[in-house]
Image (cartoon, rainbow, N blue to C red):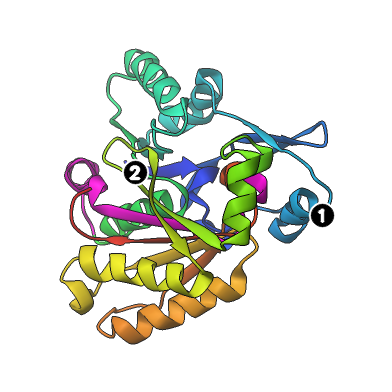
Amino acid sequence: MTLKISTSSTADLNKALLEERDIQYIPFIFTIDDKEYNDDLGQTIPPARFYEMIDKEGAMPTTSQINVQKYMATFTPWLKAGHDILYLELSSGISGSAQALMVAKGMLEEQFPDRKLYFHDSLCASAGLGLLTILAADMRDAGKSGAEIDAWITENKLRVQHWFYTTDLTHFRRGGRVSAASAVVGGLLNICPLLHVDAEGKLIPVEKVRGKKNVMRTTLDKMRAHAQDGTAYTGKCFISHSAREEEAKELAARIEEQFPQMKEPVQIFDIGAVIGAHTGPGTVALFFLGDTR
């Protein structure tokens, strides 16, 4: 009997990494320019084009969560084949998919009472969800059982730290997340909001920082303050971004300089269409293991 590890497309990992680590994903749905797409990790609409459509053409994408029927259709063949399943979903503080997942879980447990279903509301988002998923795959590949991985996730998922900042308030204004007046003033003052994901899995504003250099420095300060063992941190670190690759690379270089004991380089990913539909271009997000949110 094998353990299938799976997550949704909102983990913002790339297809090559998921295939390399034998992790399946379920796509969310997004709509842009009146056309509906599976969030297929940028294969149909590459991230650069997606953010160009928003930034240059004024597109306002919308998203749809995964429903019970889609979970059932995905998981049923795996269970029939004799697999147990460990699945990690986008935070319930951001999406209703985790609720649909648990409805599907109850139905599947009735149909397959001999299978083990380790389903989690991750309370994580973007590459924070991705980081938790990769850590689960690490444990599987090290020989841990599904029950052991499940227990570790339950105990540690709130240790996945999320720190986001944006340098572009335009999409926030278009989507009504900030007022037009606030966006104008913020733009004039070069305000870059810093946000994090809290213990309920909700995206919460933390500070208004003036200037890109300052907000990047503040983000690094948060990692020093919250990372496990501080600057002696040895764990994984992920960055995701929406059309800000050079900023992401600069942040990664600073992290690797200031946290020299990390065993692996910082990994950088694009923010996918579903999360990106809400952030727009201009966002950089940092994820690592640390103290409990």
Horizontal and vertical percent position of residue 258 = 31, 83
The residue carrying mark 1 is 56
Horizontal and vertical percent position of residue 2 = 34, 44
- Tell me the element at label 1: loop
- Does 214 appear above or below 87? below
Q: Are dots 1 and 2 in contact, CB under 8 Å?
A: no
Left or right, residue 268 beside residue 225? right
Within-10-Å neighbours for mark 2: few <14, some 14–19, many 20+: some
The residue carrying mark 2 is 3
Instruction: Report if residue 54 lies within the magenta region.
Output: no
Which stretch is magenta? 143-172
Q: Assign the N terminus to one quadrant of the image.
A: top left
Instruction: Report if residue 165 lies within the magenta region.
Output: yes
**Res 41 seen here:** no
Q: Residue at x 21, y 53 (%)?
A: 144
Left or right, residue 160 beside residue 48? left
Q: Residue at x 50, y 29 (%)?
A: 77
